[in-house]
Amino acid sequence: MNHGTTFNVRVLAIESRVNARGEVTSYRAAWKVDGRKFTETCKNLAQADAYRSRIQTAAKNAEPFDKATGRPASWTLVVDETPTMGWYELATRFIDMRWPDISAKHRFGFSYLLANATFAMLRECDCPYTAKEVRTALRRWAFNTKHRANAPDEQRQILAWVGDNCEDVGWLAKPGNARELLNAAINKLDGTRASAKTARKHVYMLNSVMRYAVELQLLDSDPIKSLKWEPPAKAVLQVDRRSVVNPHQAKLLLDAVYGRKPSGAYLMPFFATLYYCGLRPEEAVDVRRHERTLPGTDEEWGEFYLTRAAPDVGRDWTDSGEARDDRGLKHRAKGEGRPVPIPPPLVAILRRHERDNGLGPDNRIFFGVQRKVLSTSTIQRLWGLAREDALTEEEQASPLAARPYDLRHACLSTWLNAGISATQVAEWAGNSPMVLMTTYAKCLTGQGDIDKQKIMKVLGDGAWKGKPLALVPPLPAPRAPSGQPGRQVV
């Protein structure tokens, strides 16, 4: 950071700040101290002009300016007991504070948010690096507690520049400034609004950073919380019914996986488990032998008792250095389990798999041909080849079973269409009944035609089919007045 005073001061023209509609929202007095730009935001032009005049008068009177604050040194003589801290330092301290207690996925999410937010906290000045270089240095090194100390020299130089050119946290308390930080959180890199889910998540995460700043007495209150903003309409995430396979299509796909040498025989039981039991891929890859119970015969039901999941987040964010994190089940406390029934067809597949292929690392049931933990790339590659082998060109171009996760959708839809209660399906699937009914309650491919046939069977002969015109009785002739013959109606 810069320290000391200087007489190298240049006062700049007043800047106007506009919103997306081109309307002026505020004005800024701007000046440079020893080449570093400082600003003061004001609500109207007169206030900005008055502040600029004060800076200009101090410069003309040859007052020394503080390099750190950018203000005349005489202005800082008044004792201010409020702590100060640059945004970059706050952000790194925040991620270090949260790192031990959050999942690898959340670590990555906070790194993404803080990198975007830091751009809103940079002073306007000439940057010697591209935006991509700065963003990469922030995400990959600055906001990664595990790797920051090992950053290469080039990345350290970028981060040092960021630290020297970030506003203090107290800058957010001034009118209009917090809005820039909020916009950085809720917008994508191209300036358009992020999805409703992403925007809400980022604002929630940004609020936690602000609460930490309040805890450190850098702010009196959360300036983001008081801002009004309109999130996009919340979309209801529903499974595309075109992606859900029927039993015949599922069999073709599993056969295609099995036929792919040399990995097919190892991965087919994994995909079969997604289809027959509705497990999430990150749950299935981590199932151990002691978490499954197989019956005495292949005609009986078995059971999984799941206790963990291994989402693929990347080795940079996990404590172990492995690509997959070691987590509890989704929506459950760590160690809390979930029973899932194993139907007889899968019992036979698993028994044969364990007999022929044995067990993987740490007694995992599913593993690759090299007997390593299944990677996402291996799963996706083999599934793509199976779709090419099993589906027609028209089906390949459609969303049908586009992802392995779609096998889970097919399983839950099958259970619901079989008449299993939503409460029971939700328990097996690890969802709430409400989420289940809004997200997974979809018909199988081809199920619509079957349902229509059922409707026609119920209607049967009772459906009106029309009558021949000749059988329609003629209209009766109108009754003639008393004493007069009636007229024939033609």
Image: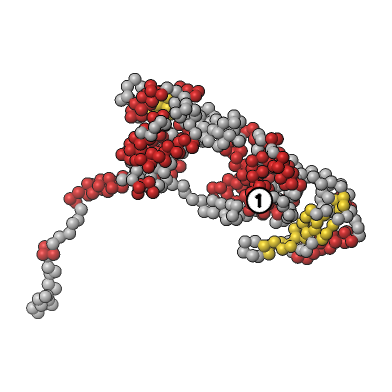
Residue 414 vs 46, above or below: the answer is above
In this rendering, the answer to whether 488 lies above or below 420 is below
The x and y percentages for residue 453 are 25, 47
- Residue drawn at x 41%, y 29% is 266
| Residue 25 point in image, percent of width and height | 68, 62
Which residue, given by chain and number where applicable, does mark 1 sit on? 131
Give the x, y percent position of residue 73.
88, 52
Colour scheme of this structure image? secondary structure
At x 83%, y 53%, the residue is 34
Residue plotted at (38% across, 41% down): 387
Q: Is residue 134 left or right of residue 57?
A: left
Packing grade of label 1 (10 A; few <14, some 14-19, many >=20) is few
Circle 1 — which element? helix
Front-most of 370 and 427?
370
Q: Quadrant of the C terminus?
A: bottom left
Residue 329 visible, this orientation: no
Question: Looking at the image, which is closer to me, 221 or 25?
Answer: 25
Q: Is residue 250 left or right of residue 96?
A: left
- Asked whether, in this view, residue 318 is left or right of residue 150, the answer is left
Asked if residue 398 lies left or right of residue 187, the reply is left
Residue 429 x %, y %: 43, 35
